[in-house]
Amino acid sequence: MTIGKTSGIRRPRWIIGPSQIYIGEKTRIGRFAVLSALKDYAGVPLNGRIIIGDDIYIGRWVQIHAMDCIEIGDGAVLSEHVYLTDCVHGFDPLGPPIMEQKIASKGPVKIGRRCFVGFGSTILPGVTLGDHCIVGARSVVTKSFPPFSMVVGNPAKLVKTFDLATNDWIAIR
């Protein structure tokens, strides 16, 4: 694992594929974090990568699972109990037990610079959040949103955008 100056991950923690995890400088990751950059699953070789930028706060009980790539931009905040994944399980009812079935990538996950992801939120495969997005608590983000978006709900929907001319969040009607 590559970890920058003054960065740290509190113990206890669970790290899978440390050689495929990069953490920038001044980044703090709370207790009970799971960082899983998968090298293989169910006998299939993978190249999972987790790239965490500089000056990031990641709360306790966060889980990040990558078979492709999950990237978190500088200055982002992930609150407690946040879940990020770029993969899905096979669900062949006639196949082996679910945990033995192959997984698939539905695309990388990218969290932009200075985003805030609220408590208990889930970011699903293929999602990109532009810079300065806010995700409300317990939201499930199933699609991408542009910079300066505020999203909430399950599935997450756009509720506000930040207007740079007025320096204010404007409700979507």
Image (cartoon, rainbow, N blue to C red):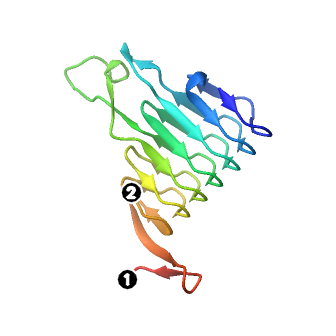
**Residue to which mark 2 is pinned:** 144
Between 142 and 68, the one nearer to me in the picture: 68
x, y (%) of residue 74?
A: 63, 52
Q: Is residue 12 above or below residue 163?
A: above
Q: Which of the 4 image quarters holds residue 13?
A: top right
| Mark number, residue 41 | none
Amino acid type of the residue that numbered disc 2 sits on in the rendered structure: Ser
Quarter of the image for the C terminus: give it: bottom left
Q: Residue at x 49, y 82 (%)?
A: 170
Q: Residue at x 68, y 40 (%)?
A: 24
Secondary structure under the numbered disc 2 in the rendered image: loop
Q: Which of the 4 image quarters holds residue 26?
A: top right
Which residue appears farthest toward the right when viewing the image? 6
| Mark number, residue 173 | 1
Other-residue count near label 1 (Cα within 10 Å), few / some / many at <14 / 14–19 / ≥20: few
The reply to whether residue 53 is visible in this rendering is yes
- Whether residue 20 sits left or right of residue 97 in the image: it is right
Q: Residue at x 59, y 30 (%)?
A: 21
